Image: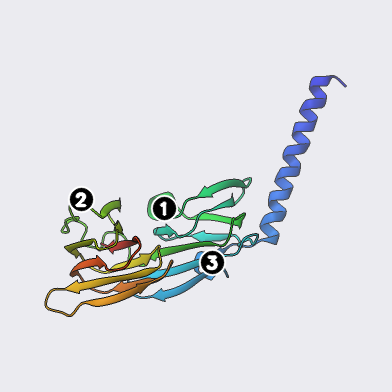
Amino acid sequence: MSKAVFIAACIALTSVSSLASLKALAADDPVVPAHEEPRHVPKLTNAWVRVIDVNIPEGERTLFHEHALDYPFLMVSSVTLRNQIYGQEAKDMPITRGLVGYYNASTQGAYTHRFINLGPGTFRAIGIELLKPPGNGNASTTTPIAPRAGLTTVVDNERVRAYRIVLQPGQSLGPVTLHGPSLRVALTDGVITDQRDGEAAVDVVMTPAQFSFSESARTLTMSNRGTQAMEWVEFEFK
C-alpha cells in the first residue's frame, strides 16, 4: 500500500469514526428547549417575555438545548465556556461580564448547543425569550434616548432596545423615558433611587442578575446615592 493510499484510508476511517461519534452523541443527548434545561431556570413568564436565569457552577455542563425564540441576553460573570454547537466540535469561548447580545432566531433559525463552564467561578447570565411574534410591536413609533453621560445604547433592532447604565456615586440620569414594557437587570451590588414625576422617590436594592419587569412606559430619574459605581441594563421591548 502506497503512503498516499494509507493516508487517505486513515482520513476516511477518521471521518467515519467522527460521524459515528456524532450519531451516538445525538442518541445519548436529546435536545430540550432552553427553558427546560435544568440550569436555565425560568424566573418570570408573561405575555411579553420569559426571563431565564442561567446559573452554572464551574466544571458543570448543560444538556443540549435549543434557543428557538429571539433572545436578548446579558452576561453577568466572566468565564470561559467550552461551547459545542450540535453536530460540531466543542470550542472554548471567553465570556466577558457585561456583554449584551441578541440572537435572532426568527431569521437565523434555532440555535442548539451545550457547554461546560471552565471557570473561574460560576457562570451567570440572564436570557430573555421574546414571546410575542415579530412585527407586533411599536418599533416604528419610539425614539431612543439621546446619548448622555452614564447611558449607552448597546442593542437596537426591530424587537428590543437595550441601554447600559453606569452611574458613579452621586451621579443622576434623567428624566428619561423607557417606552413600553421593559426589564432592568443588575450587574453590581448596591442601591439606586428611582424618582418618577409626581411620586415619592424609591430606593432599589440591586444584586448581580437581579431583575425587575415594568409593564408600561415610564419616565424617571435614576440616581446613585451610594459610595460605589452602579451598573445595570435596561431592556426596552418593542
- Residue 30 appears left or right of 168: right
Q: Where 5 sits versus 110, above or below?
A: above
Asked which quadrant contains residue 227, the reply is bottom left
- Disc 2 marks which amino acid? Pro
Q: Mark 2 points at which residue?
A: 147
- Disc 1 marks which amino acid? Leu
Q: State how far apart marks 3 and 1 are (Cα).
A: 16 Å
User: Closer to the camera, 134 or 48?
Assistant: 48
Q: Mark 3 points at which residue?
A: 55
- Residue 58 appears left or right of 148: right
Q: Can residue 85 be seen in this view?
A: no
Q: Which x, y percent locates residue 62?
A: 60, 62
Q: Where 94 sits versus 37, above or below?
A: above
Q: Which residue is drawn at 75% across and 32% down?
A: 11
The residue furthest front is 227
The residue furthest right is 1
Q: State how far apart marks 1 and 2 are (Cα).
A: 19 Å
Quadrant occupied by the C terminus = bottom left
- Disc 3 marks which amino acid? Asn
Quadrant occupied by the N terminus = top right
User: Closer to the camera, 58 or 7?
Assistant: 58
Q: Which mark is residue 79?
A: none
